[in-house]
Image (spheres, rainbow, N blue to C red):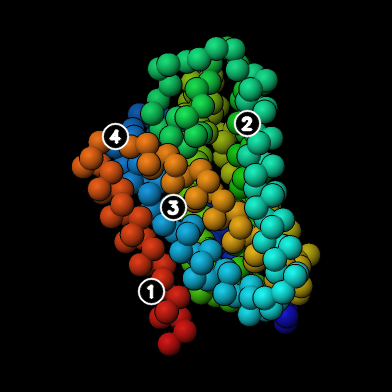
Amino acid sequence: MPSLSHSEILHTLVALAIVCAASLAGSATFALGKRLNAALPYLVSAATGALLATAVTHLLPEAIQRLGYGSQFCILLLIGFLVSFLLERLVWLLFQKTRNGVAGNAPEVINIIHHGHHHSRHGGIPLSTNILLSGAIHSLVDGMAIAAAFRVGHNTGVATTIAVLLHEVPHHIADVGVLIYTGLTKTRAILLNLLATTGCALGGIVVLAFGAGRVSEGLLPVTAANFLYVAIGILMPELQREQNGRRSIWQVVCLLVTIVFIFELGRFAHE
C-alpha cells in the first residue's frame, strides 16, 4: 500500500478531531443540564445501524478484496471478536470490584450505554478510574479504526468515522454521567472525560505513523468484528428491551435509515 498523501492525512486528522469535539460537546451539554435522555435512545439506534452497515458494506468487502477470503482473513476476524469480548469482560470485572450495592436511581442514559449495570456512589475513585480507563481504551480502538479505514480509501474512512461518531458520542455522554454520579464536579468530570477522549486521536496517530501496509489492512477485519460485536452483542439487546411501543418503532426507523444512508454512501462511492 502506498504512503498516505497529505490530503489523506489531513482528512484522517480532521475526522479524529470531529469525533473528539463531538464527544466533548455532547458530554458538556449533558453535564451542564441540557439533558439528552430523550434523544439518546434514537442516537443509540442510529449507532447500531451505522456500525452494522459500515462493517458489512465497507470494512468486510474491503478486507476480503485486500486480504482474500482465506485463513488469514478468518483468523483476523476471529481475533477481532475475541479481543472485543475480552475487553468488555475486563471492564465488567473492574466494575464488579468497585460495586458496593445497587443504585436504583442512576440516570437512564447511564444504564443504556453501560449495558444495564448500576453503579454505586460508594465506588468513588476506583469506579471513576475504571470509567476513564475503559473510555480511553474504547477511544483508542476507535481512533485506530478511523485511521486504518482512511489508509485504504477515503469513502471507507468517511463511513467508519460516521459509525464511530454515532457510537462514541453517547458512550462518552454516559461516561461523564457516571463520573458525576460518583461525586465528581461537573467541570472535573468533563475535563477527565476529555482526557479519555484523546485516546481516539492517539490511536489514529499511532496507525498513521506505524500502521503502513499490511498492518492497516489487517486492522480492517478486526475493526469489522469489533463493530459487529458492539452492534449485535451490546446495543441491539438494549434496543430489544424497550417497553414503549412508539419509541421502539422510531428506534427501528432510525436504525434502518442509518443503514440505508451508509449503504448508499458506499454505492455512490463505487459509481
Query: What's under tag 2, amino acid-wise?
Result: Trp
**109, above or below 258, in the image:** above
Q: Are marks 4 and 3 in contact (CB under 8 Å)?
A: no
What SS does tag 3 mark? helix
Q: Residue beneath label 2, please? A: 92
- Which circle marks residue 205 in the picture? none
Instruction: State left or right for residue 108 relative to residue 247.
Output: right
User: Is label 1 or label 4 in front?
Assistant: 4
Measured in 3D between alpha carbons, the distance from the residue under mark 3 to the one under mark 1, in whole angstroms, is 17 Å
Label 1 – label 4 distance at C-alpha: 31 Å
Q: Which corner quadrant of the image does residue 245 belong to?
A: top left
Quick one: label 2 or label 4, which is nearer the N terminus?
Answer: 2
Amino acid at circle 1: Glu
Nearer the N terminus, badge 3 or badge 1? 3
Q: Is residue 224 above or below residue 126?
A: below
- Helix, strand or loop under label 1: helix
Frontmost residue, 110 versus 77: 77
Sequence-first disc among 2 and 1? 2
Q: Amino acid at mark 3?
A: Thr
Q: Nearer the viewer, residue 28 or 237?
A: 237
Task: Classify mark 4: residues with Cα within 10 Å, few (<14), some (14-19) or many (20+).
Answer: few
The residue identified by callout 4 is 243
